[in-house]
Amino acid sequence: MRYELRDLAVFKWVMEHPGRGVPYSVRTLAEASGISRSQVGRLVSGELPDLPVHEAHQMSEALGVAVLVLFMPPPSPIEGRVVI
């Protein structure tokens, strides 16, 4: 299951104004979250629209915000299915 980034502009703002200290660069956020630098870079550039659930939680934890501030869970827990 993957969580979709809600808003790239909000994500970038939180990187610059994290809940836990100094602003993050791609490199420092990768180090703090345990997610690869290339994956963080692709997320920041807008090339990557989502992350696996555990990585979305790691990213949010590193930034000091709740996961739902930055990411949306899928509409259904079953891959490819939409609940109406």
Image (cartoon, rainbow, N blue to C red):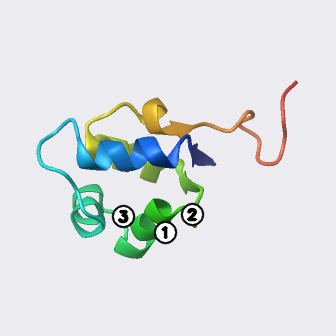
Residue 38 left/right relative to 22: right
Q: Alpha carbon of mark 3 to alpha carbon of mark 1: how far?
A: 11 Å
Q: Given the current orientation, which residue lies at the most extreme top position?
A: 84
Residue 82 left/right relative to 29: right
The C terminus, quarter of image: top right
Under circle 2, the secondary element is: loop
Residue 48: mark:
2
Residue hosting label 3: 35
Q: Quadrant of residue 28?
A: bottom left
Residue 27 left/right relative to 41: left
Tell me the residue at 73%/33% (across/down). 75
Residue hosting label 1: 42
Closer to the camera in the image, 52 or 71: 71
Disc 1 + disc 2, Cβ < 8 Å? yes
Type of residue at label 2? Leu
Q: Earlier in the sequence, mark 3 or mark 1?
A: 3
Q: Earlier in the sequence, mark 1 or mark 2?
A: 1
Tell me the residue at 16%/39% (across/down). 20
